[in-house]
Image (cartoon, rainbow, N blue to C red):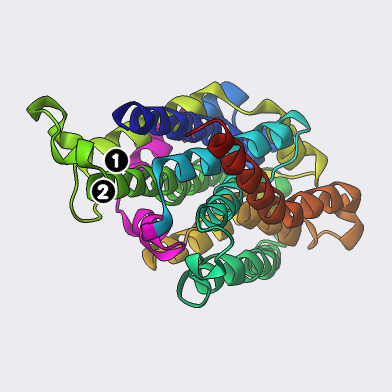
Amino acid sequence: MLTLVFCVIVVALAFEFINGFHDTANAIATSVGTKVLTPAQAILLSTVFNLAGALAGVAVAKTIGKDLVDAKFISSVTVLAALTSGITWNLVTWYYGLPSSSSHALFGGLCGAALASAHGNWAVIKWSTGLWPKIVKPMVVAPATGLLVGFLIMSLLMMLLQRIRPRIVNLVFGKAQLLSAAWMSFEHGRNDAQKTMGIIALTLFTASTQSEVFANLPEWLSFLKIQEFKIDLWVKVTCALTMAAGTAAGGWKIIRTLGKHMVKLQPIHGFAAQTTAASVIGFATHFGIPLSTTHVISSSIMGVGATKRLNAVKWPVVERMVWAWLMTLPITAFLAWLILNGLRAIGL
């Protein structure tokens, strides 16, 4: 049992690392696309502020660990299946340069694995109090908000600055975009890193309450045992550092998709998109809502780009992204269901 828990923690940290480089683009793609920062500079900035954000608060972590599925049906094997499903989907979408949601890959995997663990009992999924208000509804509302607010902020900036020379505008917002990129990175860490914290805490909580092995842990391993759901400091620090390391590894394919291939951006557009996305994510994080930062920044870029003209947005690229978004939850849920049944078949 103890070995299995350690395996789950390692796989969870692998997911966090992949999340870091998979979602690096969310915070820095517009800075690279507008040439305000080089890719290396943008990744360094994002790494530092992702780390700071990851250490700030635990509201989202508690949502992941307590509000989505019934913990009575969760075991270390369940969590392992969920994580394996999420990692697989993240790597597939990363390979094809699609900015899909690491968050929804994890949510889908957790729900599918929990359903398999409960032998098809749908009551294991907390639909009305967790999945619907905190995952599914924000999955629609947050991108729509990003699209609308991005369009409005950019329209307002264009109206206020229409008499200012473009060179001055680019110079000012080139500097301002450094602040918006830092803020976006901070909010990304504050929301995304907490998801793996919640998964690890859920694993330790279920092991502590369901396993006799954990009831008799030696003193030097006592930090693993928790009798109430909480996010210990070592979990926060480990997840924060792992995400920062993943961020430092970069995610060049997705950076190109968001920063260059979807719409041509200037510094003022990058500032508007990042400010919009950071505001939406920060608001949701305050209420413990685990948003997809991918969805929010992508829709914010679309809204900002649409102020030029509708055909300024490269809609075929957007269509590929939307399909990836729609497929993530059902595919990862089904994949986790298959993985858990496969692990059962080999005796885990």
Q: Using a 10 Å C-alpha cutoff, classify the residue at mark 1 as few (fewer than 14 neighbours), some (14 to 19) or many (20 or more).
A: many
Q: Nearer the viewer, mark 2 or mark 1?
A: 2
Q: Is residue 11 left or right of residue 163?
A: left
Magenta range is: 44-72
Q: Position of residue 194 (x, y in %)?
A: 39, 48
Q: Residue at x 42, y 43 (%)?
A: 196
Say if the magenta span includes residue 247: no
Q: Amino acid at mark 2?
A: Ile
Q: Which quarter shows the N terminus? A: top left
Q: Secondary structure at mark 2?
A: loop
Q: Amino acid at mark 1?
A: Lys
Q: Using a 10 Å C-alpha cutoff, classify the residue at mark 2 as few (fewer than 14 neighbours), some (14 to 19) or many (20 or more).
A: many
Whether the residues at callouts 2 and 1 have beta carbons within 8 Å, the answer is yes
Can residue 9 be seen in the rendering of this structure?
yes
Q: On screen, 129 above or below 74? A: below
Q: Looking at the image, which is closer to me, 260 or 85?
A: 85
Q: Is residue 211 left or right of residue 97?
A: left
Q: Residue at x 62, y 64 (%)?
A: 139
The span from disc 2 to disc 1 (Cα, nearest Å) is 7 Å
According to the image, label 2 marks what residue? 231
Q: Position of residue 16 (x, y in %)?
A: 47, 35
Q: Residue at x 34, y 26 (%)?
A: 3
Q: Position of residue 32 (x, y in %)?
A: 65, 33
Say if the magenta span includes residue 66: yes
Q: Which mark is residue 49?
A: none
Which of pointers 2 and 1 lies earlier in the amino acid sequence? Answer: 2
Residue 249, located in which quarter of the rendered image?
top right
Residue 18, located in which quarter of the rendered image?
top right
Q: Which mark is residue 236?
A: 1
Residue 177, located in which quarter of the rendered image?
top right
Counting every numbered tag in the picture gives: 2
